[in-house]
Amino acid sequence: MSGENQQVDASSTPDAVPGPQAGPAGPALPAVPVQRASRARRLAAPALYLAAAGAAFAYVGAVDPNEPGHYPVCPLLRLTGVLCPGCGGLRSAHAFAHGDLAAAFGSNALAVVGYFVFAGFMALWLVRAFRGGPVPRIVLRPALAWAVGAVVLVFAVVRNLSFGSALAP
């Protein structure tokens, strides 16, 4: 094999991308190894998101939204007297940060569900980043997107009616 190039089989090299195949232009090139990002680099993005969410919860946990003057009033509530789906979200986050789930649900149940969905997504992202897997993507099919929108709309309407006052903050 003095002057011949050897063709490398990509299936025998675990982290290799096969090079061009031999053809009329000449012999094949060897497989090119794929460089994987380090574990620290893969964990950087989810760690930054968790740090930002943690800092936001720490701030809301330290600065009580139940005391007037710390946060702006919801513009929809101020102008119309109608509770939006997010009304009570800061009070809910404050109670959640202090570990009071009953008060958190009482302020905004939809926000608490969102906190748990976010926590589940972050856990999935961290596990995949640690193992070197793909970043999870949030892909809402149209039917699911409409269902989520309908749940938010029903929540907003019901909490403004007399029989749904338990959902009001």
Image: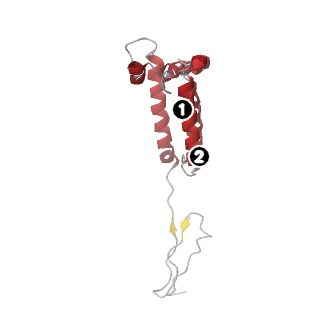
User: Which residue is identified by label 2?
Assistant: 143
Element marked by disc 1: helix
Q: Amino acid at mark 1?
A: Leu
Q: Which colouring convention does the figure follow?
A: secondary structure
Residue that appears at 49% across and 59% down:
35
Chain-order first, disc 1 or disc 2: 2
Residue that appears at 55% across and 52% down:
134
Q: Quadrant of residue 69?
A: top left
Residue 4 drawn at (x, y percent): 51, 86
Q: In the rendered view, does 126 fall on the left or right side of 80?
A: right
Q: Is residue 31 visible?
A: yes
Q: Nearer the viewer, residue 134 or 31?
A: 134
- Say if mark 1 contacts mark 2, CB within 8 Å: no
Element marked by disc 2: helix
Q: Quadrant of residue 165?
A: top right
Structural distance between the alpha carbons of marks 1 and 2: 15 Å
Residue that appears at 47% across and 47% down:
41
Q: Amino acid at mark 2?
A: Ala
* Position of 117 relative to 91 (above/below): below
Q: Is residue 99 visible?
A: no
Residue 102 drawn at (x, y percent): 61, 17
Q: Quadrant of residue 8?
A: bottom right
Label 2 neighbour load within 10 Å: few <14, some 14-19, many 20+: few
Picture quarter with the N terminus:
bottom right
Q: Which mark is residue 145?
A: none
Label 1 neighbour load within 10 Å: few <14, some 14-19, many 20+: few
Q: Nearer the viewer, residue 86 or 100?
A: 86
User: Which residue is identified by label 1?
Assistant: 153
Q: Nearer the viewer, residue 45 or 27?
A: 45
Q: In the rendered view, does 123 fall on the left or right side of 48?
A: right
Residue 7 drawn at (x, y percent): 55, 79
